[in-house]
Amino acid sequence: MSLYDDAVLVLKGYEGQEELRRTYLEHLETHPDGMWKACGDGHITASALVIDPARERVLLTLHRKLRMWLQMGGHCEPSDETLAAAALREGTEESGVAGLTLLPGGPVRLDRHPTPCAWHLDVQYAALAPAGAVEAISDESLDLRWFAYGEVADVADESVVRLLEATRARL
């Protein structure tokens, strides 16, 4: 199965955010290249909120280009077999944390937002950090930091806050 086909299946099975879910599916129907950064009308991206429920904290990255505290995530790559695999790859690459596992149940949220390259139609997952997780900053980040749940609203935008809330509701 192609990444495109996986994305369609994931989105068809996603429950919630019905209007946005339809927007994503319509985008893929009209853009066969809608999984890739080269699609100038927008593209599907995958992200992962790295969370440590035992210590009630999340790991956020200060994005190098956007200069905002965000969850780990980004563009799909040809080597990604599934959206979940893309989110886990992005989470691992950008956090440096080995042994992340995705929270069961598929995506936690969808979030459509403009970026310098195009609209991102982000499929958002949550990744559980293993006990004793040690982070390592990547080239894509200016900083990488753990924040207590209650601190997230003070540093991140509403999309990250909503992702954290949805993740916590699923725990």
Image (cartoon, rainbow, N blue to C red):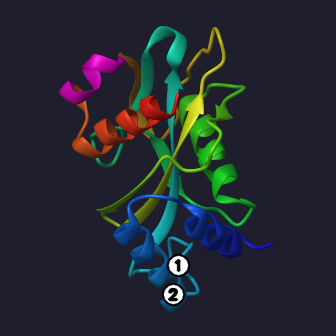
Q: Where 41 sits versus 115, above or below?
A: below
Residue 150 is covered by the magenta coloring: yes
Question: Could you tell me the amino acid type at mark 2?
Answer: His
Q: Position of residue 60 (x, y in %)?
A: 40, 30
> Which quarter of the figure has residue 160?
top left
The crowd level at tag 1 (other Cα within 10 Å; few <14, some 14-19, many 20+) is many
Q: Nearer the viewer, residue 161 or 12?
A: 12
Q: Can the viewer see residue 122?
A: yes
Q: Quadrant of the N terminus?
A: bottom right
- Residue at horizontal 61 percent and vertical 38 percent from the top: 93
- Residue at horizontal 50 percent and vertical 67 percent from the top: 44
Residue 156 is covered by the magenta coloring: no
* Secondary element type, mark 2: loop
Q: Where 60 sits versus 148, above or below?
A: below
For disc 2, the marked residue is 31
**C-alpha distance separating marks 1 and 2:** 5 Å
Q: Position of residue 53 (x, y in %)?
A: 51, 17
Left or right position of 62 against 79 = left
Question: Could you tell me the amino acid type at mark 1?
Answer: Gly
Left or right position of 100 against 11 = right
Residue occupying the far left of the picture: 154
* Secondary element type, mark 1: loop
Q: Are marks 1 and 2 in contact (CB under 8 Å)?
A: yes
For disc 1, the marked residue is 34
- Residue at horizontal 69 percent and vertical 75 percent from the top: 5
Q: Can the viewer see residue 69?
A: no
Q: Where 38 sits versus 141, above or below?
A: below
The crowd level at tag 2 (other Cα within 10 Å; few <14, some 14-19, many 20+) is some
Query: Start and end of the magenta stretch?
Result: 148-154
Q: Taken as a whole, is the magenta stretch helix, strand or loop?
A: helix
Residue occupying the far right of the picture: 1
